[in-house]
Image (spheres, coloured by chain):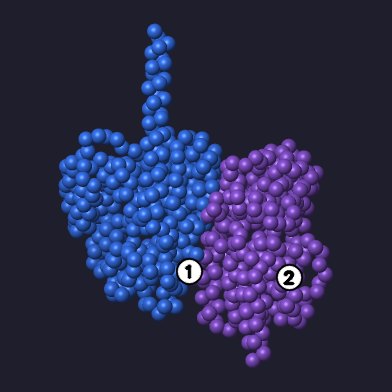
Chain colours: A blue, B purple
């Protein structure tokens, strides 16, 4: 058995580690590129959302490299992702590509099916071995997420554009090769030091922008045209509403135990959106409010074109933006999105944010002077 | 009190229930007129560009009604059957409308969620009526009458009538031995004569009997849907794949037309599954018609005629 899986950000690092620890051979699809998109758009439905097209591209490329089994997550709606695997299976079948699909559905109180699925792809490994492999994979994931948060801070302040991105590549590579939890800890420490050692610019004129939206477009740089790197190199510190480890905690751990750790999101969004709408539509609203309260300069919403939950959010965000006083820019991404187009819009947005900040500062200075005059 | 109900989206499925309930409580119910160019334009300019055509049409109807009603009735349609959803946009619709930055009367939006139990819709209606000052008894009585009215409507659809036939009181002329076409679509695309560019009228004028998913008994749909590799969580998608699967297997129609609106999320996958299934069976001609706000008669007529020529040519050979 040669297992492959769809790309999503650095998901391949913990997944490869998980399977390797259980002695299961994996084929990581090539990094998402032109070829991936070309295959995906040729064989996936025209109006499907972009992640499905990229999945199909990943699978076809992995099949060429000898993969015979796909492992991916399922879902229960209303977002389209919950039916991806079934549609993808049909596409592969009609193409005559021999790939078994093992779909791990979120356990809605029934752990048996998930357990059977896990057993099927782990070659009948026992619970203890799965637990150990899971622990290593989990630690890699949390280390990646911690370091990526740090990366966003450093990148906005680096003296040489690209320096932190280069360091990040090294870190991901080393984490990918780590074989024990202790080794992950060591690499994480080194990684922090590596990022800390990057020379910074003299000034500290950094804008802070929150990224909200659909999980796949947020997490996959090849699909969001590396918006985080582009912003970082424009001197913008990025805060992201979703990290993979948080998502795993909320959806795989809390929800399947019928616990909630997202009440606060519902409470914040309630004046604007009174019900969950699938995907991360509600979080796009609640995090925009959070970011405004935290004093960030702006918010960028990312989503695949025709993404239903994010269209709901997009329809409501202008009102939220006015009420809480934070500019919001939306990017709906598809296979035709261009880096140049995005960069132009980002530059204009950052100009707007800088101007707003200057005006706010002038206003504050003016108010301070006026207060001083009054005291005299 | 005058309550406005936009003639859009699932109005076509549920208007007997909705209208009767409020009328029974003594409210004056005002529906918007059938979609026209002005309503569509109003909706297109008020909604975000990425929204699908039916949502834009809905905005248009709501804005059209706004000056004429004291309340707008815009239910939050989460689920019509246990274990399913309808569409994320319908779950957020009342909020999208409220925050569209337009002048609107208060929007009444009970959450209709069959996942919360068999009486969830009823309780939501009764609670909403309570907010408007109606007692529980009165609301329960109104609910019973409304449900009966809805059942009569569903029965009429089962006899082979379209919602338009029912509202226009059309005679039973469609049960003849004419050749039948299966037309699959969400009700708000197909039964909105303006949006669908009169598709049903055109097909009938060419001498075809039109069958829609609504005309099949729920039992048949459920049986067919159970063949899917995984329970489909969109109830409208289930209706389409259920009816499509049934006729692909059993025959009885000479062709299948799937009508979708541009940018429809669920249909982008449901349509793909339907088309692949139709191709595998390989017996029935299949046409996919995509509607958007720019659709003109010309393009559609050409495609439709080419399709019908193929259907007739196959029938002759």
Count of numbered circles on the image: 2
Q: Are marks 2 and 1 in contact (CB under 8 Å)?
A: no
The disc label shown at residue B201, or none? 2
Tell me the subunit letter for badge 1: A
Q: Quadrant of residue A112?
A: bottom left
Q: List the residue tagged with mark 1.
A: A45
Front residue of A130/B198: it is B198
Image location (x, y in percent) of residue A86: 46, 68
Question: Label 2, label 1: how many angstroms apart (C-alpha)?
Answer: 30 Å
Residue at 83% x, 70% y: name it. B171
**Residue B63 relative to residue A198: left or right:** right
Judge if badges 2 and 1 mark residues of a common chain.
no
Image location (x, y in percent) of residue A83: 48, 64
**Residue B179 relative to residue B86: left or right:** right
The disc label shown at residue A64, or none? none
Quadrant holding the C terminus of chain A? top left
């Amino acid at each position: 058995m040669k297992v492959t899986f769809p790309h999503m950000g650095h998901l391949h690092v913990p997944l490869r580690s998980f399977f390797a620890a259980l002695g299961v051979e994996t084929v990581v699809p090539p990094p998402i590129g032109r070829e991936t998109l070309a295959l995906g758009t040729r064989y996936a439905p025209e109006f499907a959302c972009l992640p499905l097209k990229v999945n199909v591209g990943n699978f076809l490329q992995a099949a060429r490299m000898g993969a015979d089994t796909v492992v991916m997550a399922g879902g229960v709606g209303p977002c389209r992702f919950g039916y991806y695997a079934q549609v993808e299976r049909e596409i592969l079948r009609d193409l005559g590509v021999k790939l078994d699909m093992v779909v791990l559905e979120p356990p809605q109180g029934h752990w048996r099916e998930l357990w059977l699925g896990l057993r099927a792809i782990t070659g009948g490994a026992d619970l203890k071995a799965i637990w150990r492999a899971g622990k290593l994979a989990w630690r890699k994931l949390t280390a990646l997420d911690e370091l990526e948060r740090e990366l966003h801070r450093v990148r906005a302040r680096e003296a040489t554009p690209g320096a932190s991105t280069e360091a990040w590549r090294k870190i991901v590579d080393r984490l990918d090769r780590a074989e024990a939890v202790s080794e992950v800890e060591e690499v994480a420490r080194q990684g922090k030091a590596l990022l800390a050692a990057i020379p910074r610019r003299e000034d500290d004129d950094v804008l802070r922008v929150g990224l909200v939206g659909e999980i796949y477009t947020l997490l996959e740089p090849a699909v969001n045209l590396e918006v985080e790197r582009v912003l970082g190199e424009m001197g913008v510190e990025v805060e992201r509403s979703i990290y993979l480890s948080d998502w795993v905690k909320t959806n795989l751990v809390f929800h399947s135990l019928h616990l909630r750790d997202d009440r606060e999101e519902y409470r914040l969004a309630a004046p604007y959106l009174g019900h969950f709408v699938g995907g991360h539509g509600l979080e796009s609203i609640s995090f925009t409010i959070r970011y405004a309260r935290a004093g960030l300069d702006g918010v960028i919403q990312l989503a695949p074109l025709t993404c239903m939950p994010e269209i709901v959010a997009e329809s409501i965000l202008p009102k939220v933006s006015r009420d809480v006083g934070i500019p919001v820019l939306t990017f709906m991404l598809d296979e035709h999105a261009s880096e140049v187009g995005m960069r132009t819009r980002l530059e204009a947005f950052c100009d707007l944010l800088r101007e707003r900040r200057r005006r706010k500062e002038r206003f504050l200075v003016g108010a301070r002077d006026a207060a001083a005059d009054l005291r005299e | 009190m005058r309550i406005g109900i936009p003639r859009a989206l699932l109005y076509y499925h549920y208007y007997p229930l909705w209208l009767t309930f409020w009328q029974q409580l003594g409210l004056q119910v005002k529906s918007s007129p059938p979609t026209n160019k002005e309503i569509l334009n109003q909706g297109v300019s008020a909604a975000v560009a990425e929204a699908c055509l039916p949502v834009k049409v809905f905005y248009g109807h709501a804005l059209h009604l706004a000056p004429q009603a004291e309340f707008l009735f815009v239910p939050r349609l989460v689920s019509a059957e246990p274990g399913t959803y309808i569409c994320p946009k319908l779950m957020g619709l009342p909020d999208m409308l409220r925050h569209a930055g337009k002048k609107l009367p208060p929007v009444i939006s009970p959450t209709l969620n069959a996942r919360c139990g068999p009486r969830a819709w009823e309780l939501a209606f009764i609670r909403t009526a309570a907010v408007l000052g109606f007692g529980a008894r009165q609301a329960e009585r109104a609910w019973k009458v409304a449900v009966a009215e809805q059942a009569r409507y569903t029965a009429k659809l089962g006899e082979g009538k379209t919602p338009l036939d029912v509202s226009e009181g059309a005679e039973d002329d469609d049960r003849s031995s004419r050749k039948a076409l299966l037309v699959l679509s969400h009700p708000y695309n197909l039964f909105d004569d303006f949006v669908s560019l009169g598709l049903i009228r055109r097909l009938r004028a060419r001498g075809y009997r039109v069958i829609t998913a609504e005309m099949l008994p729920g039992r048949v749909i459920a049986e067919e849907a159970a063949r899917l590799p995984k329970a489909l969580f969109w109830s409208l998608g289930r209706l389409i794949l259920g009816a499509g699967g049934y006729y692909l297997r059993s025959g009885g129609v000479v062709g299948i037309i799937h009508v979708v609106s541009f940018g429809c999320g669920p249909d982008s996958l449901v349509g793909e599954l339907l088309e692949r299934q139709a191709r595998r069976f390989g017996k029935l001609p299949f046409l996919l018609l995509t509607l958007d706000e720019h659709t003109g008669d010309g393009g559609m007529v050409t495609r439709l005629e080419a399709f019908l020529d193929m259907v007739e040519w196959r029938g002759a050979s």
